Image (tube, grey):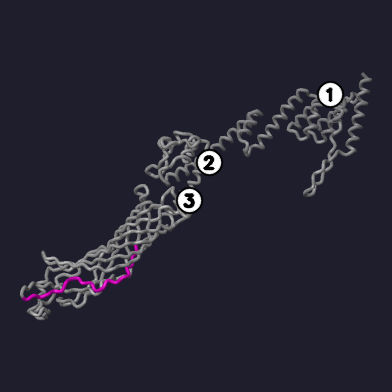
Amino acid sequence: MLLTVAVYAADFERSNWRAQMYLQAEPAFIHFESEEPQLLKESIDKELLTIPVSVGFLFNPFFTPLFKADIPFTFWLGAEVNSIQFREIASDPAYWGVGDDGKRVEDEKHDLSEAGEGRTLSFRAYAPSVVGGFSFNLGGDFDLRVLGGYGFHFFTFVDNYSTSTKDHTEMVPTAFVSGALEYRITEIFQDVDMKIGINVRREFLPYEDMMATYPYKYDKENPTPSSGFSGITFSKVSYKWPVRVGLELSFDFGRESRRDRRMRFTLRDRDQVLRDNSEVKDTLSDWDCMAIERDYRFFLDENGELPDMSDAYTKTQFSDVLESFLAFCHPADLATKEKLYASLDSGKVELKEYQVRQEDSRFDQVMASNDPEMLEMFLQYYPDSPRRGEVEAKIRTLSEYHKFREIQAQNTFKAYLSYLNDNPNGAFRDEAEAGIFELVRNSNRMKDYEIYLKRFPNGKYVEEAKAALKGANNSAPSQIEYQAPEYVEPPAEEPAVEEPEEEEEEEEVKPTPKSKKAKAKAKRAASKKKAKSKKRR
C-alpha cells in the first residue's frame, strides 16, 4: 500500500535525476613543524603557500520526488579527492655526520653542510573521501550547497638528491565540511548548466606525528653516505587559517530551480486546460508535431527568442495552431515552452485589441448605414458589445422612423395626433408638431389654431399661431374636431406616484374619474358639432 501511494505521488514527468562535477581551488598556508631531527642542525619550522585543489562528483539518490511538491532540497552522495597539493619544504640542508657509534657528532670534522647542497625535501598530498550533503535553491540561479566528508589524507614526502630519490607516504584520517554559494552562468547543453561559486572548507582532524623520512642507520662494515633529511618526523602539519576559501567551477546535470519546478507544473496544468477546451482531438502524431514545430518555428533562435511569423500567418491562425501544439505536443524544453505560452498570451491580447478595433469599425459602419438588418447582425455577432445599448436605440429609432414615414404619407390630423398620443417622447415629436401646424395653417380656421395652442402651449409655432388668429376664419368648423375628436383635449397629466417602500409591490395607477369624464364630455361635444356641420351642408 505504501508503495502504491508513493508511485501515485511520484513525479514521473521528470525524474529528478541530478548530478554534479566540480573543481575547487583554495589558496592556503600550510605549516610543517618537526621534532628534533636526527642530523639537521636546526629543526624544520616552515610555513608554505600552496593552492590545494579538490575535484568531486555528486549524484542525487532520490529520483522521483512528490508530485508538485515544492522541494527546495537536493540530497547528495558522492566522492571527492580534495587537498591535492605539492610543494618543496626545505633544500640544501645543513647537518652533522655520525661517528662510529652511529650517533651524530657536532664538530667541524663531521660538518657535512657542503654535501647537502642540491638536496631537497618536498611533499605531495591528496585526500580521497566520501561525501554527502544537500543543495538548497535560494532563488533563481543561486544555490547553496553543504557537504560533509570523511576520508584518508595521504602525505608523500620525497627526499631528492641528484638521481637518488627516496619517498615515504603517511596516511591519516581526515574529516571536513564545506559550503559553496553557486551561481548558474549558462546552460551549455540541454539540462547541463555551468556554475561558478565560492567555496569554504574546514578540516577537523589533526595531522600529527607523521614520519617524513626514515632514520639513518650506520653500518661499519658497509658504510653509506648519510642524508641531511634523514630521520625527520613532523610533530604537526596544519593550516594557518581554520577555514580555506576559494573558487569553484562546476557542471550541474539535471538541475531544476524551485521557480522552474513551479513553472513546469503551472504550464502542465495549462496544457490540460487547453486539451479540455480544444476542438481538435488528440490525433496529432509525433510527425505532426515535428511538422508544426518546423513550419511555425516553435523553437528559440540564437538570441533565445521565438522567430517572428506575423508575415506568414494571421494572428488567429497562429494562435489556434499554437494552442493545439501546446495541448498535444511537447516543446523542446521549459524555456521554449515558457516563450510559447508568453507568445500565446500576448497574441490573445493583440487579437483582442484587433477584435475591439474591428468591432469599433463595424459599429461605425452599421450606425452610418441606417439598415436595421445590419444593426441586428451586429448584435448577433457581438452580443456582449458595450455599444449594444446604442445599437438597440438606433434600431428603435429606425423602426419609429419607418412608422412616421407612413404617418407623413397620410398627412392627417388623426395620424399625427395618434403618433403623439402613443409616443409622447418620440424621436419625431417635433416633426409631428410641424405637420400638425402645417395642416392648421393651410385650413386657416380659428378653432384649429385654438386647439393647437391648447395642445402645444410651449410649441415651436405658438407665436405664429397667435398672430394668425386675427385673420383666421372663425365661422368654419374645426378640422381637428372633425378628424380626431378624441385628441382635441390635451392628455391629462397623471398624478405623481409615490415611491413604494422596500419589499412592497408597485401598484398600478388607474386614471382618475375626472379624466374619464373629461374625455367622455369632449367626445359628446365633438359628436354634436359634427352633426351641426352636416346639417349646414
Q: Distance between the residues labelled 1 and 2?
A: 75 Å
Looking at the image, which residue is at 37% across and 49% down?
Answer: 191
Q: In this view, does 215 lie to the left or right of 275?
A: left
Q: Is mark 1 on a helix, strand or loop?
A: helix
Q: Earlier in the sequence, mark 1 or mark 3?
A: 3
The residue pinned by badge 1 equals 443
Between disc 1 and disc 3, the foreground one is 3
Distance CA(mark 1)–CA(mark 3)? 96 Å
Q: Are marks 3 and 2 in contact (CB under 8 Å)?
A: no
Look at label 3 and name its amino acid. Answer: Tyr
Q: Which label's residue is closer to the chain start, 1 or 2? A: 2
Q: Is mark 2 on a helix, strand or loop?
A: helix
Secondary structure of the residue carrying tag 3 is: helix
Q: Where is residue 95 in the image (x, y as percent from the top left)?
A: 13, 75
Q: Is residue 140 magenta?
A: no
Q: In this view, does 125 lie above or below 96?
A: above
Q: Give the range drawn in magenta.
A: 199-220
Q: How far apart are marks 3 and 2 (CA)?
A: 22 Å
Q: In this view, does 226 lie to the left or right of 134?
A: left
Please tell me whether mark 3 or mark 2 is closer to you in this view: 3
Q: Mark 1 is on which residue type?
A: Ser
Mark 1 crowd level (few <14, some 14–19, many ≥20, 10 Å Cα): some
Point 85% across, 39% down: residue? 510
Q: Please give the residue where the numbered disc 3 appears in the rendered image.
A: 8
Residue identifier under label 2: 276
Residues packed near mark 3 inside 10 Å, few (<14), some (14 to 19) or many (20 plus) = few
Using residue 355 as the reference point, say whether residue 154 is left or right of it: left
